Image (cartoon, rainbow, N blue to C red):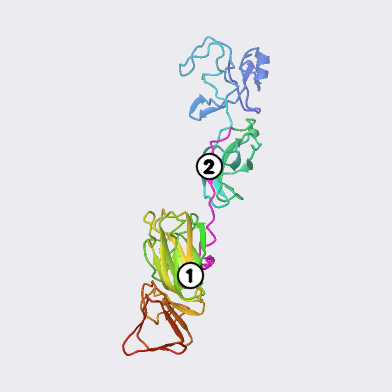
Amino acid sequence: NNDLFVSTGATYSVGATSSISTPVNQSTLANWQTATTQDANSLSVDAVFVSPTNLHLNTAANATLNAGATPVSVTIDIDCEARNATTPDIGADEFTYVAPTCAIPTAVAASTVTTTGATVSWTGPVGTYILEYGLTGFTPGTAATAGVGGTLINPAVSPQAITGLLNGTAYDVYIRQDCTGGSLGYSSNSSVVSFTTLVPPPANDNCATATVIPCGGSISGNNTAATDDALDPISCGSTSFGLTKGVWFSITPTTSGPLTVSTCTGTAWDTYLRVYTGSCGTFTTCAGFDDDGCAETTFGLSSLTFTATAGTTYNVLLSGYNAVDFGAYTISVTCPPVCTGVSTWTGNISTDWNNVGNWICGIPTITSEVVIPASRPNYPVINTNVEIKKITVDPSASVTVTTGFELKLNGF
């Protein structure tokens, strides 16, 4: 019931026979057993201890010594622990052997998630690993075989990059260890780790790629994946709010006059509108801004009207008022009415005859036919000498000529 192990070589032997003066060295246990007919139940195994200073046997590395002896009269070991009565361990230390297994990877985590990939890391002993991924809910495979819907990266090294994924898609990932090199097969799969790839920003995330809105048209979209906008040097509304996940639009009216941009319908989050003129990155003016211009009070939707000039491109920024304000939206544009050849008074701006914003088809000239309709917010006051071709004034409307000036009709 002994473990008689020595290194190989001429200077090492299990024991010696014959006499002290003329010993015959027995270099192996087999030689010793033959020469002495002793130690029939002994082994020659290189025992693995816990450490150089702790001579207890390593419970995971001494399978041959475990339960390898026959019962003897010594019933306790060096720690005074009881020996197994039927299959004691060989040597001075009674221990419980724990067979080594292929360890399951732990601490599996996903990071650096992008629109088309992610990085997965895990912990485990030095060895070979297999990563398997698939759409959320797929059943992973075992060993070196992928499950239905699974894709293998074999071998995988932590941290392992996964590429070529679909954007805005949820994935599950499992890790298992390949211990076939040590004849321990494969580990079970790790716990699942899940992630969802990012959605790319919308095409109109930047001013340079603004979506064109035609006059009288509307655009529906979603700004959830848009990026926050930086405040432009041109002052245009709030300097603290209304910059969340901005999306851009452009409008080029063909007629001058009042132009309205609105989010009053089809949007369910607090919007903010800014309108700029000039080129992207070098805006020249702020044509208008608005936070709560719509009549509803639930969300704080925006609508603004400004005086547009025919042929001018206006850059519109639609964004969320606060960080939580984003999602599906609808933005619409109402341009000045198309000119039919008759200068029609709108009075949308003031009473000033010479303000283009008060007219459809522009400020009347000497060849213009003029219409002053009813139900205008303001009616014209003439403070200069004016000559036109013809004028039609609704009975409930009015035209005021300031004393000292005249309105001349040359085609009446």
Q: Quadrant of residue 238?
A: bottom left
Question: Magenta region: which residues?
Answer: 188-215
Q: Does the magenta stretch include residue 213?
A: yes
Residue 146 position within the rendered picture, expressed as x and y whole percent measured from the top left: 65, 38
Q: Mark 1 points at which residue?
A: 335
What's the residue at 51%, 28% (across, down)? 50
Three-letter amino acid code at the position of disc 1 = Cys
Does the image show residue 123? no
Above or below, 14 relative to 215: above
Q: Residue 317 carries which label?
A: none
At x 40%, y 82%, the residue is 354
Q: Position of residue 370 (x, y in %)?
A: 45, 81
In the figure, residue 152 lies in which quadrant? Answer: top right
Q: Where is residue 174 in the image (x, y as percent from the top left)?
A: 57, 39
Q: Residues within 10 Å of mark 1 (few under 14, many from 20)?
A: many
Q: Count all numbered tags in the image, as a single digit.
A: 2
Judge left or right: residue 189 versus residue 246. Answer: right
Q: Does the magenta stretch include residue 336?
A: no
Q: What element carries label 2?
A: strand
State the predominant SS element of the stretch in magenta.
loop
The kind of residue tagged 2 is: Ser
220 versus 212 height, above or below? above
Quadrant for the C terminus in the image: bottom left
Q: Earlier in the sequence, mark 2 or mark 1?
A: 2
Task: Indicate which label's residue lies in the foreground, 2 or 1.
Answer: 1
Q: Which residue lies furthest to the left in this view?
A: 403
Residue bearing mark 2: 194
Against 109, is 301 above or below? below
Q: In the drawing, does residue 248 fall left or right of residue 100?
A: left
